[in-house]
Image (cartoon, rainbow, N blue to C red):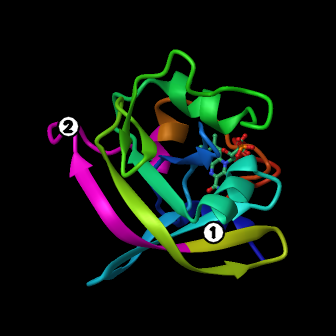
């Protein structure tokens, strides 16, 4: 099998947030898709080792901040290469509370979901969320695609990303 075919699947870049009790936490994810429109549902795939996964299992809610091409790459790195287990990722980060969940302000906008189902794979949980709120912060800037993140920002993805390929970056 030629695993490079997986590079041809398109994604965006998102910050998935939830609460660890009273404390906001979250992680970067590309594996987000809208599953249905009415009622609107969204699926997100999170690694079992990600602290965000553990917190969503308890809070039963998550928010998705949809990053734009002008979102600061620092946000992606802070949420994507550190763990909320031992880091307060929201320190110095501009965010707002919506439906009691934190959403990143440096984004196109956000969606808030209640978990209505989940599927366990060997490594990841696929959470299915019903949308309970959402808004656009910035209509003028394009949403960041995963391709833009790699091509323009020259970003990498860690092993916990479902799309990780060991030889990432190599042709
Ligand atoms: C661009 C990018 C995309 C990512 N996509 C996912 C994803 O879809 N699912 C996932 O489980 N982890 C993904 N990750 C990895 C998590 O963000 C990373 O493991 C993070 O440190 C987990 O933090 P936590 O332990 O606080 O939850 C991605 C990381 C980056 C940088």
Q: Position of residue 4 (x, y in %)?
A: 68, 63
Q: Residue at x 34, y 31 (%)?
A: 105
Q: Is residue 162 visible?
A: no
Front residue (pair 81, 7):
81
Residue of label 2: 138
Q: In the rendered view, tell whether residue 90 sits above or below residue 117.
A: above
Q: Which quadrant holds residue 143?
A: top left
Q: Position of residue 86 (x, y in %)?
A: 80, 30
Q: Is residue 161 left or right of residue 155?
A: right
Q: Residue at x 55, y 39 (%)?
A: 150
Graded by Cα atoms within 10 Å as few (under 14), some (14 to 19) or many (20 or more), the crowding at tag 2 reads some
Name the element at disc 1: helix
Residue of label 1: 5
Graded by Cα atoms within 10 Å as few (under 14), some (14 to 19) or many (20 or more), the crowding at tag 1 reads few
Residue 74 in magenta stretch: no
Name the element at disc 2: loop
Front residue (pair 99, 107):
99
Front residue (pair 49, 30):
49
Q: In the rendered view, tell whether residue 86 sits above or below residue 133.
A: above
Residue 135 in magenta stretch: yes
- Which residues make up the magenta segment? 128-148
How far apart marks 1 and 2 lie (CA) works out to: 33 Å
Considering the image in quadrants, where does the N terminus appear? bottom right
Tag count in the figure?
2
Q: Position of residue 164 (x, y in %)?
A: 73, 54
Q: Which quadrant holds residue 102?
A: top left
């Amino acid at each position: 099998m030629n695993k490079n075919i997986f590079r041809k699947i398109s994604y965006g870049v998102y910050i998935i947030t939830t609460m660890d009790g009273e404390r906001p936490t979250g992680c970067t994810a590309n594996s987000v898709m809208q599953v249905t429109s009415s009622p609107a549902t969204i699926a997100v795939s999170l690694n079992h080792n990600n602290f965000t996964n553990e917190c969503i299992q308890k809070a039963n809610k998550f928010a998705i901040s949809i990053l734009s091409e002008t979102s600061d790459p620092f946000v992606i790195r802070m949420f994507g290469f550190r763990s909320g287990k031992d880091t307060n990722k929201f320190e110095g980060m501009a965010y707002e509370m919506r439906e009691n969940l934190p959403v990143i302000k440096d984004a196109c906008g956000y969606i808030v979901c209640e978990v209505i189902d989940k599927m366990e794979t060997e490594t990841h949980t696929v959470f299915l969320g019903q949308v309970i709120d959402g808004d656009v912060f910035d209509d003028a800037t394009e949403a960041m695609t995963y391709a833009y993140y790699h091509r323009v920002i020259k970003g990498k993805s860690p092993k916990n990303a479902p799309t990780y390929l060991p030889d990432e970056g190599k042709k």
